[in-house]
Amino acid sequence: MKIKHMMSGCAITLSALFLSCSKGKVEAPAAQRLTNDNTLSAVPPASSYSVHLAGNGYVTTLASGGAEVITSNGLGNWTNANSITSIWFRVSQTGALNVSLRAKVPSGTSSIRVTVNGTVFTKSITGNAYATHSIGTVTIGAAGYVRVDLQGISKTGSYFGDVSHVIISGASTASDVVYANDAANYYWSRRGPSVHMGYTIPAGNTAEWFYNEMTVPAGEDKIGSYFMSNGFSGGYFGIQVNSATERRVLFSVWDPAAGKTTLVRKGPNVVDNTFGGEGTGGQSYLLFNWAAGTTYKFLTQIKPDGTGASLYSSWIYTPETGTWRFLATWKRPNTVSYYTGAHSFLENFIDTRGYLGRKVRYNNQWIRNTSGTWVELTAGRFTTDATGTNDQRRDYAGGLDAGSFYLQNGGFFAVSTAYGSTFTRPALGVAPTVNLTTLP
């Protein structure tokens, strides 16, 4: 499920693994389809595949003064020779890959450079109606994503041209070709797959507190990233990169089916809002210039308040200040709950930046049960959203990395993690040292 709310022009989305993570029905991969008796059967490969730039292309280099943009028609406003547009698709076979472009130019002739996995071709294109222009053939040596870059060389018209599709064929496309082909969800496909790690709470424990430690490795803190640490049934708590100059700590709680979530109290300099979009609720955030490579600690308490509502509270420990910092307490009416649905997730919330890779590590998860005992959580389960399950993209992964759980998405890497894979991290046996009675 996707729950989106807007903050200063940025769309923030909840990818909750404990709910139905789907923007549409889950389909079998392109190489398999259900027959009339609901059994899977192979589908003969197409003689060629048309990869639409609207769902698979990005302006990866926007030169000074450039106006290039990806629209529902593909590449538009191609005016600057220094701008680069990149398209990705995945093949699973080795051998020849034939590449063509469906393109048109406004007038005259445009000379362009097309680079396919590092092999450079030049092509002169004419004609003011869309036509298929053969570019060349490369040899694919291993399964994985193929990158096609487009760059202008010279033009006699007002701009280089419009490009709607990269058309591919050959032995490397004989089976299992993957690219975004669901036009209704191109926006989500370009954002990239959201990935989640669900934590198993041992039977016999009713959790009131959840503790997690999170580290964003150096270089993985791309603009548009939301690194969510403490997810629960009804909300989430983590850190994000809103722009080149702004970072936030974000804690949000959805409204229940009946009634509105309301603020009880908040910490110093914390901003509180309501949010809307694909769901509504209460939002609190703290502007804080957190740093990649630094480990932050997250603590969330959920408990009934005795009046038919429940209270949701969160704190973050920032090594820069050496203190626990309070975000907020939210009251969710018509809800009697302790902490359930413990999970973390990683997502990109800016579609134009979905080609960039991201990674995050989580370690030392604990719950404190209603009996006052800390219990370590070591079991995790990996899932992805409908961009992955509908086979629009496969650059999603999660598991264990040097003893920690990790999540990774974007960047069009070659090897994905199977949905539902389970992992067990080494137990550390080091319970949180936080004094719950002195928290702000």
Image: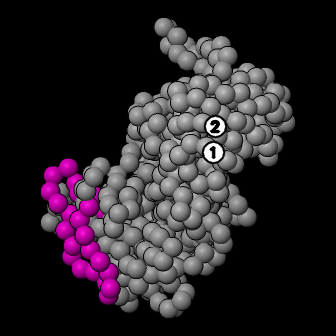
Q: Quadrant of residue 9?
A: bottom left
Magenta segment boundaries in residue numbering = 253-275
Q: Tell me the crowding category of disc 1: few under 14, some 14 to 19, or many 20 or more residues within 10 angstroms, Cα based.
A: many
| Residue located beneath label 1 in the image | 155
Residue 109: image tag: 2
- Is residue 78 toward the left or the right of residue 340 in the image? right
Percent x, y of residue 44: 65, 13
Residue under the image location 50 percent in, 55 percent down? 67
Residue 266: image tag: none
Q: Tell me the crowding category of disc 2: few under 14, some 14 to 19, or many 20 or more residues within 10 angstroms, Cα based.
A: many
Looking at the picture, which amino acid does disc 1 mark?
Answer: Lys
Residue toward you, 337 or 250: 250
Let me know if residue 313 appears in the view.
no
Looking at the picture, which amino acid does disc 2 mark?
Answer: Thr
Where disc 1 sits, the SS reads strand
Residue under the image location 59 percent in, 54 percent down? 80
In the image, is residue 422 above or below residue 201? above
Let me know if residue 327 appears in the view.
yes
